[in-house]
């Protein structure tokens, strides 16, 4: 199983020097991919800009938007952005897409929250047409550039439930499933749904299987992880944010190692770690832990 890491894009004390340092150290370390999530509201750095910078200063790791909340955007713009990122990275992009769950982000950019699932189905098909060179409008010019990867980057669906898995099985190359606290049983359940959906769709090859969870190896790791979880989830209600934050356990090396080994036993292709802070210790200590797996 490979190991990836998400940039801490929600942190305030995370400027140019820190961003570039993290990207270069990730590329030099035991990681297979570098990812970044997308949020609009709250203090967050913009995903496309972050990953463009990462693509320019790295040579080896896969660059993964995780996740591109596709129904908030124009499919044509998204196709152009992702193809450009593939060019900048030299063909290292793997595209994660999802519908998200933050209605406030949709409102902030003037996008409808309703029917976001069927819209994403249509958008993925449109992006692939754009990447093949088909004009966005009849009689129009091709929307460039063409991706470096023939046919475009692999598309990974961020999905959790059976309905979303069934949709993904129609167009995705794999799935990215997430357990906030790194519980293997939660991840296994979602992967089982993906396997079943792919079989029912008559797919010839099984889905790429990617999992992820939150962790912290900061100097005050428990506090950092629980504050991060609360901050991330409070948009769904203060009580919900506080309750889930209390369930976080991946703030000690042994706990993180056990969680990673449990996911590894599920025959995942990759595990993506999402750090709770931008402390350099998050990256350094995780690198050492991974080398011991």
Image (spheres, rainbow, N blue to C red):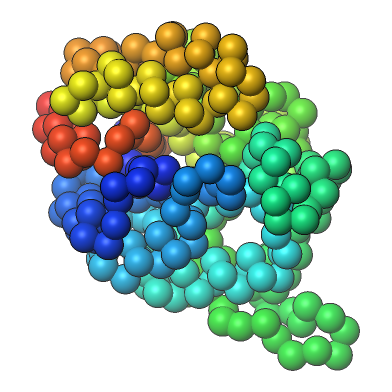
Q: Is residue 111 above or below residue 113?
A: below
Q: Is residue 18 above or below residue 169?
A: below
Q: Quadrant of residue 20?
A: bottom left
> Residue placed at 29% from the left, 47% from the top?
13
The answer to whether one can see residue 245 in this image is yes
Residue 18 located left or right of residue 64 = left
Q: Quadrant of residue 117?
A: top right
Q: Quadrant of the C terminus?
A: top left
What number of labels is visible? 0
Q: Is residue 29 above or below residue 248?
A: below
Q: Quadrant of the N terminus?
A: top left
Q: Position of residue 161 (x, y in %)?
A: 69, 24
The answer to whether one can see residue 291 in this image is no
Asked whether 29 or 47 is in front, the reply is 47
Q: Position of residue 228 (x, y in %)?
A: 40, 28
Asked whether 96 or 173 is in front, the reply is 96
Asked whether 257 or 172 is in front, the reply is 257
> Residue placed at 46% from the left, 35% from the top?
210
Asked whether 168 or 207 is in front, the reply is 168
Residue 173 located left or right of residue 263 = right
> Residue placed at 53% from the left, 48% from the top?
38
> Residue placed at 39% from the left, 23% from the top?
227
Q: Position of residue 72 (x, y in %)?
A: 71, 53
């Amino acid at each position: 199983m490979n190991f990836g890491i998400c940039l801490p894009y929600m942190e305030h004390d995370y400027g140019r020097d820190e961003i570039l340092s993290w990207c270069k150290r990730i590329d030099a370390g035991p990681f297979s991919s570098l990812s970044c999530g997308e949020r609009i509201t709250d203090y967050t750095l913009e995903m496309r800009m972050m990953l463009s910078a990462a693509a320019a200063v790295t040579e080896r790791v896969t660059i993964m938007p995780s996740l591109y909340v596709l129904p908030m955007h124009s499919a044509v713009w998204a196709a152009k952005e992702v193809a450009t990122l593939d060019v900048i990275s030299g063909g290292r992009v793997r595209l994660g897409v999802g519908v998200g769950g933050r209605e406030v982000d949709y409102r902030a950019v003037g996008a409808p929250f309703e029917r976001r699932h069927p819209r994403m189905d249509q958008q993925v098909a449109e992006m692939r047409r754009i990447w093949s060179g088909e004009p966005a409008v009849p009689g129009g010019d091709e929307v460039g550039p063409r991706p470096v990867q023939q046919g475009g980057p692999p598309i990974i669906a961020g999905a959790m439930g059976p309905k979303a898995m069934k949709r993904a099985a129609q167009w995705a190359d794999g799935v990215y499933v997430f357990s906030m606290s790194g519980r293997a049983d939660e991840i296994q359940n979602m992967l089982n749904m993906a396997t079943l959906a792919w079989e029912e769709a008559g797919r010839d090859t099984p889905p790429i299987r990617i999992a992820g969870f939150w962790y912290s190896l900061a100097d005050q790791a428990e506090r950092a992880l629980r504050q991060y979880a609360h901050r991330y989830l409070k948009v769904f209600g203060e009580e919900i944010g506080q309750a889930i934050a209390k369930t976080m356990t991946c703030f000690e090396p042994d706990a993180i190692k056990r969680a990673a080994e449990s996911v590894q036993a599920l025959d995942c292709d990759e595990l993506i770690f999402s750090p709770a802070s931008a402390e350099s210790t998050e990256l350094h200590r995780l690198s050492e832990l991974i080398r011991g797996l």
